[in-house]
Amino acid sequence: MAVLEIVTPKSANAGILRNPTRRVRTFDAALHTLLDDMILTMRDANGAGLAAPQIGLDQRISVIEWPEDPDNPEETMRRYEVINPEIIKAKGAEEGQEGCLSLPGLAADVVRATFLLVKFQDRHGAEVRLKAYDWLARIFQHEIDHLNGVLMTDRAEALYRIVENEQGEVELIPLERVAA
Ligand code: CO
């Protein structure tokens, strides 16, 4: 298993973040290794989700890790291996603050649906149907966006630069002020 390099706007292959992705048709050992490496990479970067374009691949693959009960993450952590996902139903709208492993140092306020019915395939090609609510629904939408070349900055109501002040506290600075 290997921790993979995460593509950012500074990467030589940054364009892949904007490319559409291809459906996965072969569910073989190479795919399993890739999924294992993506999970390791996501954990290593303290992320809740990672999509294949973020490691330089134009395939419809994402991994997500999020607890069923956010108050009890250790015992309710769930892992989703999301291949060829499709949103069947989306309801509700709520603004929340997101980050992205490909956009380090940025936070974005994004309105997302609060409920999703999503269909995808697991690592063996079996179809999975899942109802996702709130933050899990948000993560699925963020990751599926990646598979369509869409970044959180495209949907942001507001963007912030994450900085640490002299006291070592994290501060969010609205992006217009960073440029000034
Ligand atoms: Co992202």
Image (spheres, helix red, strand yellow):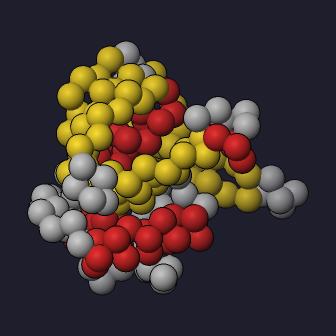
Q: Quadrant of residue 141?
A: top left
Residue 27 in view of the camera: yes
**Residue drawn 35% across and 33% down?**
130
Q: Is residue 152 above or below residue 13?
A: above
Q: Residue furthest right?
A: 167
In the displayed structure, 108 sits above or below 55; it is: above
Above or below for 53 versus 111: below
In the image: residue 107, left or right of residue 25: right
Rendered residue at 30%/83% (across/down): 12
Residue 177 image point, x, y percent: 55, 48
The residue nearer to you, when weighing 57 against 67, is: 67
Q: Is residue 130 left or right of residue 179?
A: left
Residue 155 figure quarter: top left
Position in image of residue 171 (x %, y %):
70, 48
Asked whether 169 or 72 is in front, the reply is 72
- As rendered, which of 90 and 73 lies closer to the eye? 73
Residue that protrudes farthest toward the top in the picture? 92
